[in-house]
Image: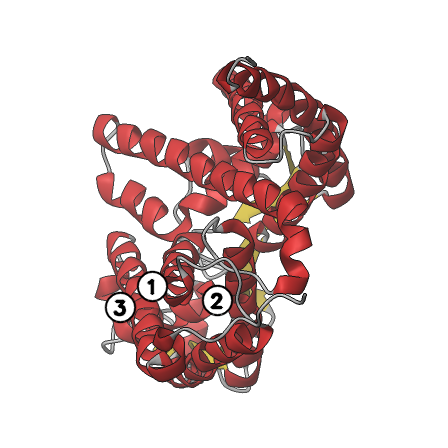
Amino acid sequence: MSPPRPTAAPATRHHGWVQAVATVLAALLAMGVVAALGLWAAGAAGLPDNAFPRVVAATVVTAVGGSVELSGNAGVLAETHAGITVIPLSVTLAGAFVVAGGFLRPLRHRAVAGVRELAGWAARIAVLWLLALTGLALGARQTFAVDLGDGVLGALGGLFGAEPEVGFTAQVPLTVLFGLLWLAGVLVPALLVASGAPLPARLLRCREPVRPAAYAMVVLLLACVVVGLVVALVTATTRGHPADHFAVILLGLPNLTWLAFTIGLGATWHGRVNGPFGLPMPHLLDQVLRTPDVSTLNVGALAEHDGRVWWLVVVDAVLLLGAAFLMAVRSPARTPAWRHALRMAVALVLTVLTICAVGRISAHYGLSLLGIGSVGGNLSGELLLVPRLWSALGLAALWGLVTGFLGALPAAWVRHRGEAPSS
């Protein structure tokens, strides 16, 4: 006898568009508020020409993977160049929580949902999300005049009448494309992670191996953010400059905490900071990266400046063992420890791969007049941060195998203690 076909719930069948509108608007509002507060703390509220709202829009665009192109115009005697690739993950996380919650809310308290129902509900959100991103990208554009200063560049600029300008423009097609990919990257994991979310009948067999591991990885990433938040708040209250610390929290806290997590695993990143970049970052990180050449960023390099960095390894071990234990407890009791180890390894490799993809940063700007670059002023800069990918993934696999096996052992003991004695 075949199982009954799942039918669409009244909430999604009759009122789907209303709930989709509420979900999209709430997500944009949450992301806009977080971005605005972070940029305000970073000092962007004082930008000329009332540019602050457009900078907030550009920040939200980049938070969903959209493309913002930097450009410059300095006349025939001068040349400007600029580019930026960075995702403010605090803003991303705020939007992801709201979108996932709005998507799952009409589906709660059900075990099975049809493919057509899930696709239709996701499509409503996607259509409205596409329209919202298009409007946001059209508004994310601004041009600023560049002050050449009082040095050689200022004198040459006044002599030849060069008035350089720089600006940013969101690329609408790329923003829509990557924004839709971002939406899919939120909705699909939401279905996999949430224990109360229904799945199509054909995918129920995937629930056992996938859902506990996916849930454990989400908890792991959020635990890293919570630990980083506590450290950031303590630092803000004890070392002064609270605005800078709140800018880090509201714009890039996951960027830093997930970077620290991979470094604690033994991963290596390469980076460089040059010039007066206004991006907020901890002093230790700025100290290691601000060198003439590309720097190596790992536990050893950071420990040369601050020996407390070795605690990252200990924190990572504790968090991974906790995640492995959580995964094992939420898995069927019959699952052997070696299978937990394999699932933990695969899940952690995918998690580290995601961190490496969204955590890389590339930003630069510069101005040259008659071939003279940044003479007499701070008119150039560079910020670079990229991972050594394959070694990071290999270390993640090793950590996953070890902690997955060890975390399964106490989970089996806990289950055994909870069993009722046989009569």
Label 2: element kind = loop
Q: Real-space Cα distance between discs 1 and 2?
A: 10 Å
Q: Secondary structure at mark 3?
A: loop
| Foreground disc of the pair 1, 3 | 1
Label 2 sits on residue: 64
Q: Secondary structure at mark 1?
A: helix
On residue 31, the disc is: 1
Whole-number angstrom distance, CA of label 3 to CA of label 2: 23 Å
For residue 16, which quarter of the picture?
A: bottom left
Left or right of 208: which side holds 139? left
Q: Amino acid at mark 3?
A: Leu
In the picture of the structure, the residue carrying the numbered disc 3 is 47
In front: 228, or 196?
196
Front position in the image: 29 or 401? 401
Instruction: Indicate which disc, 1 or 3, sits on the residue closer to the N terminus.
Output: 1
Near mark 2 (Cα within 10 A), the count class, few <14, some 14-19 or many ≥20, is many
For the C terminus, the image quarter is top right
Whole-percent x, y for residue 122 in the image:
49, 75
Query: As displayed, is residue 373 above or below residue 247?
Result: below
Depth order, front residue of 127/71:
127
Give how far apart the Cα atoms at labels 1 and 3 are.
Answer: 20 Å
Where residue 188 sits, quadrant-wise, is bottom right
User: Residue drawn at (58%, 34%), measured in percent from left and top?
Assistant: 327
Residue at 45% over, 63% down: 63
* Spot occupied by residue 383 in the image (x, y as percentages of width and height): 54, 52
- Left or right placement of residue 113 versus residue 296 in this view: left
Label pair 1/2, CB-CB below 8 angstroms? yes
The amino acid beneath tag 2 is Val
Disc marking residue 51:
none
